[in-house]
Amino acid sequence: MSLQTRPADRYNPLYFLASVGAGGLAVTFFMYLFFWVPHPGQPVPVFEDIMAAWAKGNLPQQIAIVIAMAGIATFAVLNIKALIWNLSAFAKWSRTEAYTNLRQTNAEATLLARPLALAMSVNAMFIVGMVFVPNLWSVVEYLFPAAMVAFVLVAGMALRDIGRYLGRILSTGGAFDMSQHNSFGQLLPAFALAMAGVGLAAPAAMSHTTTTVGVAMVLSTFLGTAALVYAVIALMTAMSSMLHHGTAKEAAPTLMIVVPLMTILGILLMRQDHALHVTFGAHSTDGETMVFLARFVSVQVLFLLLGLTVMIRQGYFRDFVFGTKTSPGSYALVCPGVAFQVMMFFFIHKGLVAADVLTKFSPAYWALIAVALASQAAMIALVLRLNRQHFARAAQAPAVPAE
């Protein structure tokens, strides 16, 4: 008989990024509905809006709706499946010596992948509810506080893990190895905080209850600010280490972690801006929003170019994506592509179209949409490829006992 092995059997908390990537892809399909399905009366499309658009829409719109709903359902299932597997594997792994040893190194920051994945799944499940559950909007004011509690619990987990990590390295000299800080992997805590923060910003943008909006605004502001402060410090120190030691090859995908961070913080701020407009009477112009989003897209493009340049020179794709080597950190490649698609949809619609720089459904519009869709398609292919690499079982011949 042969022995069945797979890379994922050697557990690493970075495998939580498999769940994050799948959840992010579900969000990319929701962009079709968000910007192509009319949703009068509420800031997001819900089941009733989608069914109305299906009944009245033309064939291209109906095709888009089918693709969107199928994509959301498929990747939401993969998101939850990967999350459940990770939580089970993590529970077992946390009782091993490998877990104890990891908590004494720089890699302790990778533990923040767990609250990151949990926050992503809460966001994804909210999208699933809006798309597939009839009459959800009639009880949404009761769901917002429940969602806020969930995000606060996840944020509490993240802050606890960050506190243990920073408490250890800042209270003991030499506890942090700067020579191993030659990547942007230390931005993972900021990513986790921002993901919980953008979830908390959703009730601020959607609720009609002033208390709910105010509490969500304050909490999301705290987490967004904490994420930004942490990210700036981690970026500066990591860049110094990379200039001295070069970029760690297996951690090279983290060079693009700024891309999803920009999308999450950008959406957080846009949700807050909407809340300020609807609930508190503050106003910003379409031109200001366009420039605001253009700045975020600019930062994303710069870090995409940086990451791709380094990874191509190091042969990362040749070895870890198309080759025989495997690294759980490869799942970090999914988040930038997903985040870029989402931010492009916002930039095109809330920026260029809203400011009358671009006409919706014009050739120039579809040219920019094609860039976003290409990024989405590449990430779908990447997720399927990585899942086969890491979770498919490969037969190995059993060891032959010596005579």
Image (spheres, rainbow, N blue to C red):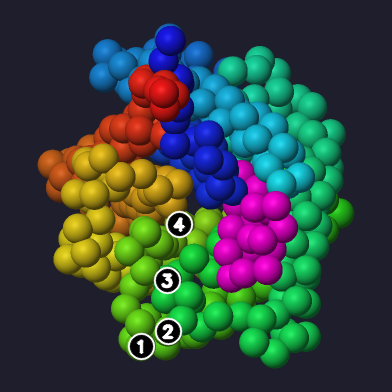
Q: Is residue 240 above or below residue 44?
A: below
Given the image, on which type of amino acid does mark 1 rest? His
Residue 203 shown left or right of residue 179 in the figure: right
Mark with earlier residue (3, 1) = 3
From the image, state whether disc 3 or disc 1 is nearer to you: 1
Kindly report which numbered mark, 3 or 4, lies closer to the viewer in this rendering: 3
| Marks 3 and 1 in Cβ contact (< 8 Å) | no
Q: Please tell me how crowded label 4 is: few (under 14), some (14-19), or many (20+) other residues with Cα within 10 Å.
A: many
Indicate the position of residue 221 as horizontal and vertical percent values: 70, 67
Q: CA distance from mark 1 to mark 4?
A: 26 Å
Residue tagged 2: 241
Amino acid at circle 3: Ser
> Is 110 in the magenta?
yes
Q: Quadrant of residue 297?
A: bottom left
Residue topped by disc 4: 260
Disc 2 or 3, which lies upstream in sequence? 3
Residue at 25% from the left image edge and 62% from the top image edge: 311
Answer left or right for 107 relative to 393: right
Figure quadrant of residue 122: top right
Q: Which residue is mark 3?
A: 183
Q: Is mark 1 in CB contact (under 8 Å) with mark 4?
A: no
Cα–Cα span, label 3 and label 1: 12 Å
Position of 39 compared to 103: left or right? left
List the residue tagged with mark 1: 244
